[in-house]
Image (tube, rainbow, N blue to C red):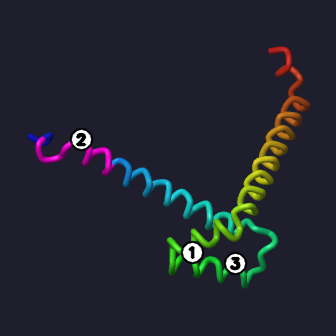
Amino acid sequence: MLAYDYPILGFFWTFLYFFVFIVWIMLLFRVFVDIFRSPELGGFAKALWFIFVVFLPFLGVFVYVIARGHAMAEHAAQAAAAQDAAAKEYIRQAVANDPSIINK
């Protein structure tokens, strides 16, 4: 009975809308994280970007990605490199404190 009321193409459109909504939410959070992580933006500029994205979310995110998209990628790469370096340092310290780990 449900199949006649909700055709397969309607299901696919609903699934597409849901997927685009999830991508939109992820992009919105990435923009907020990048706004606050960006060292080259001052406090006033961060506040302006934040207000712009909060009050005009679609336009604000679109403009932010166009204006500072390259910086978003650089910040993500720097954060990944810092996290990798921290993990390697932790492993070095763990092995130095317990040399029996190497023999296992």
Helix, strand or loop at label 1? It is helix
Q: Which mark is residue 60?
A: 1
* 11 magenta-colored: yes
Amino acid identity at mark 2: Ile
Tell me if label 2 and label 3 are in contact, CB under 8 Å: no
Rendered residue at 73%/65% (across/down): 37
On screen, residue 38 above or below 89: below
Amino acid identity at mark 1: Gly
- Taking the view exactly as shown, the residue that stands out farthest to the top is 103
Q: Which residue is mark 2?
A: 8
Q: Nearer the viewer, residue 34 or 17?
A: 17
Select label 3 or label 1 by which is in front: 1
Rendered residue at 65%/64% (across/down): 33
Of callouts 3 and 1, the N-terminal one: 3
Amino acid identity at mark 3: Lys
Left or right: where does residue 65 sit relative to residue 98? left
Helix, strand or loop at label 3? It is helix
Q: Which mark is residue 46?
A: 3
- The quarter of the image holding the N terminus is top left
Distance between mark 1 and mark 2 Cα atoms: 35 Å
Distance between mark 2 and mark 3 Cα atoms: 45 Å
Distance between mark 3 and mark 1 Cα atoms: 13 Å
**Quadrant of the image occupied by residue 34:** bottom right
How packed mark 2 is, by other alpha carbons closer than 10 Å (few <14, some 14-19, many 20 or more), is few
Q: Which residues are magenta?
A: 4-14
Left or right: where does residue 19 sit relative to residue 8? right
